[in-house]
Image: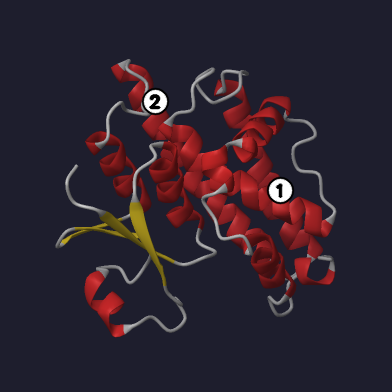
């Protein structure tokens, strides 16, 4: 891989973090440029087809969508973080896509205007986590002992779930022992811990506190 990669990022974005985790896990030298999505620079508007992060620059070429960026980085820097078995690899990709709905639930929980609305979204999220619980290996990571691309895809969700739990006094994973162990193992990984800016916890909790009229804004400490 001759061309150095540059990742265009927003500090709070979980989808950018997925790509950073893969880059860090593979010890790839890369640059990262942070922008304000509320006031993006003109060059970013021209660069990003969807006006969203992450965007990965490889020389003069541009990639967008976090799952595509993850796959590209993995493919050009062997050995792969995907399992070797084609069927297991395909199943991993399917469950990675499933995880997008959990990130959406997290966003909706933060925005919920009432306790009942929050609890309805939370219950839907927990139902999806129970589905994951049923297919998880029960070992350190999703497939077993080895950290794979699917683990990188879920780590940002679990990091934010942990921050929400600590800030607002909720316990989300008490009845999900595989998810709890998976979350603990993911958040202990160096490539995960170093994949965000040091101020992320304060930024995330500050965001929760400042969502006007939200249920969580009244609970967060």
- Residue at point 74% right, 78% down? 213
Q: Is residue 29 left or right of residue 11?
A: left
Number of the front mark, 1 or 2: 1
Question: Observer-nearest residue: 192 or 2?
Answer: 2
First in residue order: circle 1 vs circle 2: 2
The residue lying furthest to the top in this view is 85
* SS label for mark 1: helix
Q: Is residue 202 left or right of residue 86?
A: right
Q: Position of residue 138 (x, y in %)?
A: 62, 18
Q: CA distance from mark 1 to mark 2?
A: 26 Å
Can the viewer see residue 54 in this picture?
no
Q: Position of residue 198 (x, y in %)?
A: 61, 60
Residue highlighted by disc 1: 162
Q: Position of residue 139 (x, y in %)?
A: 61, 18
State the scheme by which the image is colored. secondary structure
* SS label for mark 2: helix
Question: Observer-nearest residue: 107 or 55?
Answer: 55
- Residue at point 62% right, 27% down? 133
- Residue at point 60% right, 22% down? 140
- How dense is the environment of label 1, judged by Cα within 10 Å: few (below 14), some, or many (20 and up)? many
The residue lying furthest to the left in this view is 60
Residue highlighted by disc 2: 91
Q: Quadrant of the C terminus?
A: bottom right
Residue 115 position (above or below residue 143): below
- How dense is the environment of label 2, judged by Cα within 10 Å: few (below 14), some, or many (20 and up)? few
């Amino acid at each position: 891989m001759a061309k150095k990669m540059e990742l265009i990022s927003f500090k709070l974005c979980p989808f950018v973090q997925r790509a950073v985790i893969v880059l860090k896990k593979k010890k790839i030298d890369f640059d990262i440029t942070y922008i304000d999505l509320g006031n993006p620079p003109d060059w970013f508007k021209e660069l990003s087809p969807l006006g969203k992060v992450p965007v990965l620059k490889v020389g003069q070429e541009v990639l967008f969508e976090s799952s595509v960026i993850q796959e590209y980085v993995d493919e050009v820097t062997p050995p792969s973080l995907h399992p070797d078995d084609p069927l297991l690899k395909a199943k991993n990709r399917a469950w990675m896509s499933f995880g997008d709905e959990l990130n959406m639930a997290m966003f909706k929980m933060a925005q919920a205007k009432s306790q009942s609305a929050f609890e309805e979204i939370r219950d839907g999220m927990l139902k999806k986590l129970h589905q994951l619980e049923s297919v998880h290996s029960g070992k350190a990571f999703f497939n077993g002992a080895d950290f794979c691309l699917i683990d990188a895809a879920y780590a940002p969700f679990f990091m934010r779930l942990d921050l929400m739990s600590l800030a607002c006094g909720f316990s989300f994973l008490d009845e999900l022992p595989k998810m709890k162990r998976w979350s603990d193992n993911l958040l202990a990984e160096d490539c995960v811990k170093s994949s965000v800016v040091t101020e992320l916890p304060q930024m995330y909790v500050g965001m929760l506190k400042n969502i006007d009229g939200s249920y969580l804004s009244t609970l967060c400490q």
